[in-house]
Image (cartoon, rainbow, N blue to C red):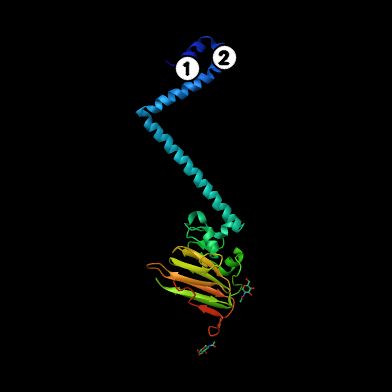
Amino acid sequence: MNPRRSSYTTGGGSQSISIDPNTFFQTQPQTSNVVASLKMFLKKPHAFPFLLFVFLLLTWVSLRLQHSASVSSSAAKTAAFNDQDLKWGDEKKSSHSVEEDYKANMIRFPSSATLSEITKDKRGWLMDPVSVALESGIPGGAQICASLHVGEIRPGSLRGNHRHYTCNETFLIWGAKTKFRLENNLMEKGYTEVMIDADDVAVIVSPSGTAHALVNVDPVRTTFFLGCQDNRIDYNSSTSDFNVWKDL
Ligand SMILES: *[C@@H]1O[C@H](CO)[C@@H](O)[C@H](O)[C@H]1NC(C)=O
Ligand SMILES: *[C@@H]1O[C@H](CO)[C@@H](O)[C@H](O)[C@H]1NC(C)=O
């Protein structure tokens, strides 16, 4: 019945001399025998668990491959934006893409961030948003703060939705889930929108002539923000546009 077994029995008797030619000449038939018996086996109902196992194994392998491909491609993107890629926040631990944040001129520090720019210890975080923005390489950040605005935005409320023509502004935003919209004429809609999570600390650059809006979309928490402008704005003159977006 089993030619494979009988060939080993014959070969075993006369030691290595007859084993070698046997195995050599029988390589082809043995392979086709294996294929044939595999076919037989697969036709039987008890092959089902085996097939299921093979299928699961293949699925697992393909998921692993996909995962490592996406990790390496996002790492490549991060590196392309800035060679000190850690500056863009700890992407692996954040559900947001570095690319989207980049389009919104944003540097995000998720609660898990352990970066040098955001000094964190038991007391909490501490940072200089103006230098974080300048060091990030995003153009249009304020170099100095000629005017500072610090404030809160209660749940459901909106601030900004305006465009200043005579100042660059660097924002620091934290405290609640907050939607930030920044004018971006490279986008089809004319803007980029990012969601800042309640645990995130975000630095955003809005260069002169770029509209921006902050909306607290958190059900309970208050958004806090700081805006550093490199020039004093005369709100009486026509150096700003207000109510830029009607859908906010
Ligand atoms: C804003 O930044 C630009 C460089 O990005 C600079 O040329 C300009 O002087 C800055 N200040 C104002 C008020 O535009
Ligand atoms: C702006 O205009 C108002 C009147 O509309 C006036 O009372 C105020 O003094 C002006 N402020 C400046 C800075 O010119």
Q: Nearer the viewer, residue 121 or 17?
A: 17
The crowd level at tag 2 (other Cα within 10 Å; few <14, some 14-19, many 20+) is few
Q: Is residue 101 above or below residue 68?
A: below
Residue at disc 1, CB closer than 8 Å to ligand 1: no
* Of the image marks 2 and 1, the number of the one nearer the N terminus: 1
The residue closer to the viewer here, 174 or 193, is 193
Residue lying furthest front: 188
Whether the residues at callouts 2 and 1 have beta carbons within 8 Å, the answer is no
Residue 34 position (above or below residue 171): above
In percent of width and height, residue 134 lies at 60, 67
Residue at image point 42% right, 70% down: 222
Question: If the image is split into quadrants, where does the N terminus sit?
Answer: top left
Residue 76 coordinates in the image, percent (x, y): 58, 52
Secondary element under disc 2, as helix, strand or loop, is helix
Q: Which residue in the structure is indicated by mark 1?
A: 4
Q: In which quadrant will I find the C terminus?
A: bottom left
Q: Is residue 174 visible?
A: no
Q: Tell me the quadrant of ligand 1.
A: bottom right
Q: Which of the labelled discs sits on residue 160, or is there none? A: none
Report which quarter residue 118 is drawn in: bottom right
Q: Is residue 83 left or right of residue 52?
A: right
Which residue is at the far top? Answer: 14
Does the image show residue 35? yes
Give the amino acid at mark 2: Pro
Taking the spot 61% from the left edge, 67% from the top edge, the residue there is: 139
Q: Which residue is mark 2?
A: 21
